[in-house]
């Protein structure tokens, strides 16, 4: 009986010695190049990788930015400061590793990291054909918006608030 190799969720950047393996895995998943695509208003770029000692099983990438700035909207303020969000811009798990909880673990790591960065929310978008991603996001409590007029017709938007007031959390726990 063989055992599956242990998968670790790690935080990488382009200086990681196995970065080229991540790029190859992204290409294999049709995620295109993992180029940075940074804009002047992005505050940081972050990459979570699900990996064994020998291979990359999946990844998630997000950048931080002020809420609304990428939509040419005024910045949203929270506690008198511009609110920052973690915007997931790439996410995937290689086929042999799917349905084993790695996508969930990667999403948890995004949330942990976003909280450490004091983000107000985690936001992403996904094509309507990505049923597995939609099921994952809804199971984690993300809200969904069916799209906007200027977005591609098959795109849904997701958001997960990270700053819920304690009285709201308590009220939900009572239900």
Image (tube, rainbow, N blue to C red):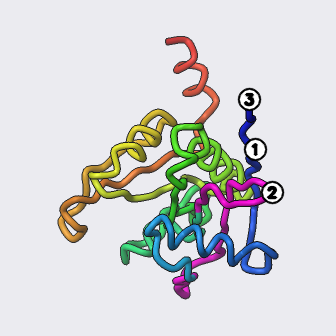
- Find the distance from the CA under tag 1 to the CA under tag 3: 13 Å
As drawn, the label of residue 1 is 3
Q: Are marks 3 and 2 in contact (CB under 8 Å)?
A: no
Q: Mark 1 highlights which residue?
A: 5
Q: Are marks 1 and 2 in contact (CB under 8 Å)?
A: yes
State the image quarter where residue 113 is shown.
Answer: bottom right
Decide: is 10 above or below 65: above
Q: Nearer the viewer, residue 80 or 26?
A: 26
Q: Nearer the viewer, residue 115 or 49?
A: 49
At mark 3, the secondary structure is loop
The residue lying at 59 percent from left, 48 percent from top is 107
- Find the distance from the CA under tag 1 to the CA under tag 2: 8 Å
Residue 84 pos. (x, y %):
58, 63
At mark 1, the secondary structure is loop
Residue 30 highlighted magenta (yes or no): no
The residue lying at 58 percent from left, 41 percent from top is 104
Residue 67 pos. (x, y %):
49, 65
The magenta stretch is 36-60
State the image quarter where residue 71 is shown.
Answer: bottom left
Outermost residue, bottom side: 40
């Amino acid at each position: 009986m063989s055992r599956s190799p242990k998968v670790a969720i790690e935080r990488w950047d382009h200086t990681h010695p196995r970065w080229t393996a991540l790029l190859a895995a992204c290409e294999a998943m049709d995620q295109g190049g993992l180029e940075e695509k940074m804009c002047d208003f992005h505050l940081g770029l972050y990459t979570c990788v699900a990996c064994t000692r020998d291979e990359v099983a999946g990844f998630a990438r997000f950048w931080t930015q002020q809420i609304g700035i990428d939509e040419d909207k005024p910045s949203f303020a929270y506690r008198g400061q511009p609110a920052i969000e973690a915007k997931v811009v790439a996410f995937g798990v290689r086929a042999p590793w799917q349905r084993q909880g790695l996508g969930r673990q990667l999403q948890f790591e995004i949330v942990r990291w976003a909280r450490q960065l004091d983000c107000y929310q985690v936001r992403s978008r996904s094509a309507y054909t990505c049923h597995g991603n939609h099921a994952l996001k809804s199971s984690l409590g993300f809200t969904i918006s069916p799209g906007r007029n200027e977005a591609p017709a098959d795109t849904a938007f997701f958001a997960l608030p990270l700053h819920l007031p304690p009285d709201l959390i308590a009220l939900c726990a009572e239900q």
